[in-house]
Amino acid sequence: MTNQRGFTLVELMIVVGIVAILSAIGLPAYQNYLQRAALTDMLQTMMPYKTAVELCAMEHGGPAQCQAGEAGIPAARGSRYVSALSVANGVITLTGQESLNGLSVEMVPIRDSSEGGISWQRSCTSSNSSLRDNCLAQFRFADKGAGDGEA
């Protein structure tokens, strides 16, 4: 009898099974990580508008005159993950694209009469519950009555 070297079919199938199990665990975690990274990009796109709306509301006594491209608020622009951005009466609305497709985020300024500043109410709307939950976690500020954005 000759001495054979190599792997048997059973050993190869065990290795394939282990790789499949690790892939099944790792792929959803990686997709969740990519989704959160895209939401961070959306948040960074929104931040200059949030600051500008706060300044505009302070200067004009409220957000009613705060529009994109006016009163110190930058003109609307998108980013890799933001297909549309608008500012109307201080309300900032973002629409997602690519991995954030189907997501809509609305930030509503609320005048805080006791503090004299602005707080923000956020709303994340998507048919994908994981995307909506990640959005609500990412867009968190010292807000009043944050909406859950049920789709």
Image (cartoon, grey):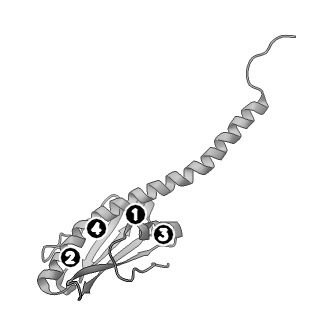
Q: Nearer the viewer, mark 3 or mark 1?
A: 3
Q: CA distance from mark 4 to mark 2?
A: 11 Å
Query: Mark 2: which amino acid?
Result: Val
Residue bearing the label numbered 1: 97
Q: Residue furthest right?
A: 1
Q: Which of the two discs, 1 and 2, labels the residue nearer the N terminus?
A: 2
Q: Residue furthest top?
A: 2
Is the Cβ of the residue at disc 3 closer than 8 Å to that at disc 1?
A: no
Q: Residues within 10 Å of mark 3 (few under 14, many from 20)?
A: some
Q: Can you tell which quarter of the image residue 42 is in?
A: bottom left
Q: Which of the two discs, 4 and 1, labels the residue nearer the N terminus?
A: 4
Q: Can you tell which quarter of the image residue 16 is in?
A: top right
Residue bearing the label numbered 3: 133
Q: Which mark is residue 46?
A: 4
Q: Can you tell which quarter of the image residue 20 is in?
A: top right
Asked whether, in this view, residue 148 is left or right of residue 114, the answer is: right
Say which element carries label 3.
helix
Q: Is residue 78 visible?
A: no
Query: Mark 1: which amino acid?
Result: Gln
Query: Mark 4: which amino acid?
Result: Met
Is the Cβ of the residue at disc 3 closer than 8 Å to that at disc 2?
A: no
Q: Which mark is residue 53?
A: 2
Q: Nearer the viewer, mark 1 or mark 2?
A: 2
Where 47 sits versus 64, above or below? above
